Image: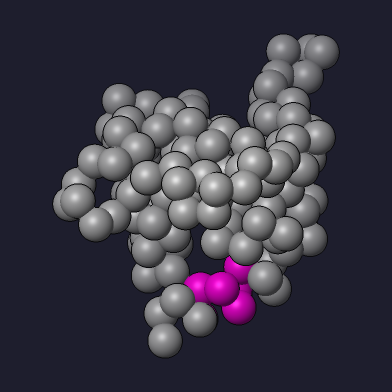
Amino acid sequence: MAEYAYTTRVNEKIDVYSFGVVLLELATGKEPNSGDEQTSLADWAWQQYGQGTPIADCLDPEIKEPCFLQEMTTVFNLGVMCTHPSPSTRPSMKDVLEILRRCSPDSNGETKTGAELDVLPLLGTEASLSATTQHETA
């Protein structure tokens, strides 16, 4: 269910949340409300993150080829960040765009790897993710 349905307030962070759901759809191949009736795709992704499920296990089998794994892992992580339960912790769309640009090949046609695709340090929210995960799993 869309976050707007819970809050009835419209702001940029709701747009970020919605975009995060789209990113999670792309990365996982799942529909926003697939699975049981109680769990949205965003909730499912956060559960997987909190349980320490390898991200590769969450990705759509159609796109888990080694050549796409790093990029799709970044897309999944970004989707999780955009759907953070705390709106103030979500990245801005400007930050989202910067992260997605880092996923694209550079001017030489080479795709960036490793730390260049790591979402958490760019956003500076690793501590926030840990705190949220600990809170949700407690």
Q: Nearer the viewer, residue 10 or 123?
A: 10
Q: Is residue 56 left or right of residue 18?
A: left
| Residue 23 drawn above or below residue 6 | above
Residue located 56% across and 73% down the image:
132
Residue located 43% across and 29% down the image:
26
Q: State the image coordinates of residue 19 (x, y, percent, origin top left).
A: 57, 34
Q: State the image coordinates of residue 69 (x, y, percent, origin top left).
A: 47, 36
Residue located 30% across and 25% down the image:
62
Q: Is residue 116 left or right of residue 32?
A: right
Question: How is the structure coloured here?
Answer: one colour
Q: State the image coordinates of residue 49 (x, y, percent, origin top left).
A: 44, 62
| Residue 62 drawn above or below residue 55 | above
Is residue 94 at all visible to an observer of this figure? yes
Q: Nearer the viewer, residue 67 or 85?
A: 85
The magenta-colored residue range is: 129-134
Q: Nearer the viewer, residue 34 or 60?
A: 34
Q: State the image coordinates of residue 7 (x, y, percent, origin top left).
A: 54, 54
Q: Quadrant of residue 28?
A: top left
Prevalent SS, magenta region? helix
Is residue 79 inside the magenta stretch?
no
